Amino acid sequence: MKIDKKFYWHALYIAVPIMIQNGITNFVGMLDNIMVGQVGTAQMSGVAIINQILFVFNLAIFGGVSGIGIYTAQYVGKGDREGIRVTFRMKLLLVAILIAAGIGILLTQGMDLASLWLKGDNRPEELAATMTAARGYMLVMLIGLAPFAMTQILSSTLRESGETMTPMKAGVVAVFVNLIGNYILIYGSFGAPKLGVVGAAIATVVSRFVECGYVYFWTLKNVDRFPFVRGVFRPVSEAEEIGNYVAPKDGVVALHGPAHGFYIPGALGRKIIIRALPLLLNETLWSLGQTVMSQQYSALGIQVVAAFNINSTIANVFNVAFIAFGDATAIIMGQELGSGQLDTAKHDANRLACFTLLLCVLCGAALFIVAPFFPLIYNTEPEIQALATGLIRCSAVFMPLYAYENSSYFTIRSGGRTGITFLFDSGFVWAVTIPVAFFLTHYTGFTILPIVIIVNLFDFIKAGVGFVMVQSGMWIRDLTREA
């Protein structure tokens, strides 16, 4: 069978910059985690707990912009500039609401939420040190929510428009700023104050402002290539719209811009929100489900929290492969559906899924090999290091399964079937995964490793459902024509 090299190169062109950006981000995050881990187990656990809570906010932002981005990718395929602008405006409005809600919840309930991870049999002084570290870290990290969210809006729209290099470059610059800031502020290098976990938070916040500034000013500088920013807050004349325009392949160009500035057509806005809200709820509930799972596991002791932190730190570095190809699948499928290539969509989705699976078999094997060595870097007890090794090996073995689930999710989502993806993703977590984990942690004598293995085995059900839905073709739809 002849291999379509052009197709795979196109997929790699989209996925590799995302992979590099996420890989470097997670690698520096790993170094950040190791640096904090050198301060002590309590400090590492406090930071891990707050990051688990912030994970919910981050995925809510991701879900919001991604849900709207389903339309953005299809409007790019159709060549509809004003459609892209409308989706960009909707991202801005939705994210502003999410930022206000996130800051309000964390300021009023943040420490109460953090205390949920500290219900096991732990020493009082250990609990106090963990909560102190968590509080200091959280208060600084709140400052970085706004630039993080703005970066997601701009970067997602650029990626959906086919530009993946700029978000990657911005991410690379940001992570090195973060790394340098960590070295200076955590340990008090070069005469700076020794701030510990607060220093780690300051470095992260500064890096987020740098990343946001990079993407923002680059986009303004290249407005002729990406003209959606030209008309976000003001009317666009027909001369401006056509001036530097390169027609899409099918010759479609939509000039239905408003007569005034920040404008969202009511009917179109409602259709987009109907598609986007299930995805926003899905990402929020899925991340909340993962947070609840983490809290359930923490009932077995704070050592489990520390071991999971070590596991997730290294696993995230290797998971970038299937995460990046999930993004690439959403972009490629969205553009194909928007440009009317409905007949080839399922075939291309299967090719992307197989390629992702092969890649993750290799990544999983590499992760399994490094599992015994990585935990030794941390300044923590041998029991925690041994536990972390087992969890890392578990992540390695199940990585291909995660990869196929992720590929199925993004494929179904590309056609706007967000209600189904809601049930497929977060619905499965809350209906199956969490009850199984709760039962095993509270009503059996199993240790953490058998529990994690049993919980992961249930994901084969989810993968099977995903396979059936993708092969059925029920997700293949041109949303721009419906809108």
Image (cartoon, rainbow, N blue to C red):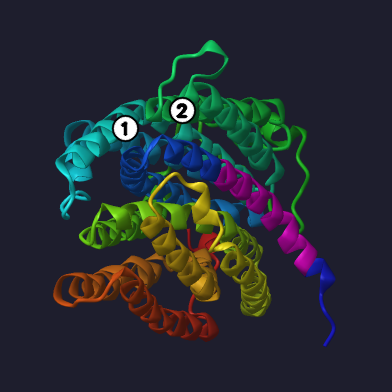
Query: In this rendering, does residue 162 appear at all?
Result: yes
Using the rendered view, name the quadrant where residue 281 is placed: bottom left
From which residue to which does the magenta span run?
8-28
198 left or right of 479 in image: left
State the SS at label 1.
helix
Query: In this rendering, does residue 236 appear at all?
Result: no
Q: Amino acid at mark 2?
A: Val
* Residue under the point 64% across and 51% down: 18
396 left or right of 165 in image: left
Q: CA distance from mark 1 to mark 2?
A: 11 Å
331 left or right of 298 in image: right
Magenta span: chief secondary structure: helix
Of 199 and 220, the residue lying toward us? 199
Quadrant where the N terminus is found in the figure: bottom right
Q: Which residue is mark 1?
A: 138
Q: Amino acid at mark 1?
A: Met
Mark 2 packing: few (<14 Cα in 10 Å), some, or many (20+)? Answer: many
State the SS at label 2.
helix
**Magenta segment: does it hold 100?**
no
Provide residue 29's location: percent of width, then percent of height.
52, 42
Disc with the residue nearer the chain's start (1 vs 2) = 1
Q: Which residue is mark 2?
A: 205
Q: Which mark identifies residue 36? A: none
**Magenta segment: does it hold 21?**
yes
